[in-house]
């Protein structure tokens, strides 16, 4: 099995006058957040909201810029998120994928909208009164 990528559109939520950027993002279900390279943050003129300490795959930690807010769009879905600036390729973590109700189809190495909810993103909210 290989790596799965998704073509996503990223935009600066505070600057709708700026053009969005399309990136080929790794669908990284082992990660939580959106990760973007520095040149994407610069192109979108994102604000640095704070520094965040992250743990990378080898177990080491790094302090990275947390930028945003970013509008992430895929197919008929969108969500708002912050982005960790690190590396030379974008990756889409579990939080934005869950927020947009996306699924990874490993057999075809594709990301798709959840077939159970093709027209809108759905979510589960447990513990609410009936």
Image (tube, helix red, strand yellow):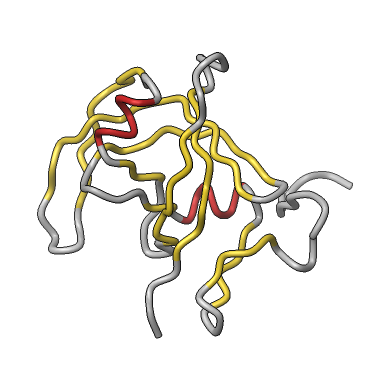
Relative to 26, residue 49 above or below: above
Which residue is depicted at the point 19% across and 55% down? 56
Give the image quarter of residue 62. Answer: top left
Q: Position of residue 85 (x, y in %)?
A: 27, 37
Relative to 22, residue 6 above or below: below
Q: Residue furthest right?
A: 130
Q: Position of residue 69 (x, y in %)?
A: 46, 25
Q: Nearer the viewer, residue 24 or 81?
A: 24
Which residue is depicted at the point 44% across and 61% down? 27
Give the image quarter of residue 46. Answer: top left
Asked if residue 90 lies left or right of residue 65, the reply is: right
Relative to 105, residue 79 above or below: above
Q: Nearer the viewer, residue 39 or 101?
A: 39
Q: Position of residue 108 (x, y in %)?
A: 55, 80
Asked if residue 72 lies left or right of residue 67, the reply is: right
Q: How many marks?
A: 0
Which residue is depicted at the point 73% across and 50% down? 121
Image quadrant in which the N terminus is located:
bottom left
Which residue is depicted at the point 57% across and 75% down? 105
Q: Residue furthest left?
A: 60
Relative to 26, residue 62 above or below: above
Asked if residue 80 lies left or right of residue 43, the reply is: right
Q: Nearer the viewer, residue 94 or 43?
A: 43
């Amino acid at each position: 099995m290989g790596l799965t990528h998704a073509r996503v559109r990223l935009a600066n939520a505070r600057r709708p006058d700026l053009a969005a950027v399309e990136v080929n993002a790794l669908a990284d279900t082992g990660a939580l957040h959106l990760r973007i390279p520095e040149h994407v943050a610069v192109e979108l003129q994102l604000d640095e909201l704070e520094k965040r300490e992250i743990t990378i795959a080898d177990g080491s930690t790094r302090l990275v810029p947390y930028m945003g807010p970013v509008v992430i769009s895929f197919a008929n879905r969108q969500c708002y998120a912050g982005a960790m600036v690190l590396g030379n390729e974008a990756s889409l973590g579990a939080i934005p994928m869950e927020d947009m109700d996306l699924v990874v189809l490993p057999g075809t190495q594709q990301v798709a909208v959840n077939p159970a909810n093709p027209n809108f993103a759905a979510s589960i909210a447990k513990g609410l009164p009936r």
